[in-house]
Image: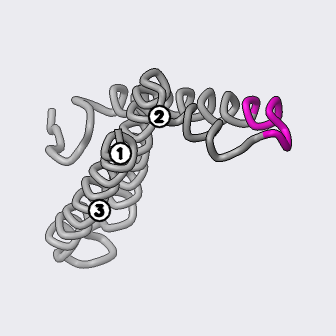
Amino acid sequence: MVTSVTSLGRNGISDWLVQRVSAVLLGVYLIGLAGYLICTGSDLEYATWHALMTSLPMMIINTLVVFAIAAHAWIGLWIVTTDYLTSLQLKGAATGLRLLVQSVLALLLLVYVLWGLWMIWGGA
């Protein structure tokens, strides 16, 4: 059995599960945040929002969300690059191009994760 070193999980089922769990986490997060915004209505002020976002439980949740976004995006981008950057279309140059594109995407995701963590924990 061939395993890809650029895949997040050990196999397709692991990747599928990571993507579904991250999607559920992101959905619950967005619904919870929307519920909070609806409940506070027009009474939401900067001090209230800042207090919510700088509380330890919310900082931990936001950290999990940043990692969930990165994992979800990586699996989706990996699938797209392996499906559409194939040797049939590019006549032999696909492996190098795919590795280059995946490396750039991985670097961008790393930058986004570090930036997100800096926003969450940098001002604490």
Label 1 SS: loop
Q: Residue at x 27, y 31 (%)?
A: 11
Residue flagged by tag 2: what amino acid is it? Thr
Indicate which disc, 1 or 3, sits on the residue closer to the N terminus: 3
Looking at the picture, does residue 96 appear above or below residue 30?
below
Q: CA distance from mark 1 to mark 2?
A: 9 Å
Q: Residue at x 35, y 45 (%)?
A: 123
Q: Measured from the top left, where is residue 70 in percent x and y?
A: 37, 45
Q: Which mark is residue 109?
A: none
Q: Residues within 10 Å of mark 1 (few under 14, many from 20)?
A: few
Quadrant location of the C terminus in the rendered image:
top left
Q: Measured from the top left, where is residue 19 in percent x and y?
A: 44, 34
Asked whether 87 or 55 is in front, the reply is: 55
Q: Measured from the top left, where is residue 51 in percent x and y?
A: 56, 33
Q: Residues within 10 Å of mark 3 (few under 14, many from 20)?
A: few
Label 3 SS: helix
Q: CA distance from mark 3 to mark 2?
A: 26 Å
Q: Are marks 1 and 2 in contact (CB under 8 Å)?
A: yes
Residue flagged by tag 3: what amino acid is it? Leu
Residue numbers of the magenta segment: 35-43
- Marks 1 and 3: which is nearer the front? 1
- Marks 3 and 2: which is nearer the front? 2
Q: Measured from the top left, where is residue 110 in percent x and y?
A: 25, 53
Indicate which disc, 3 or 2, sits on the residue closer to the N terminus: 2
Q: CA distance from mark 1 to mark 3?
A: 23 Å
Residue flagged by tag 1: what amino acid is it? Gly
Q: Which mark is residue 108?
A: 3
Q: Which mark is residue 54?
A: 2
Which residue is disc 1 drawn over?
Answer: 123
Asked whether 64 or 95 is in front, the reply is: 64
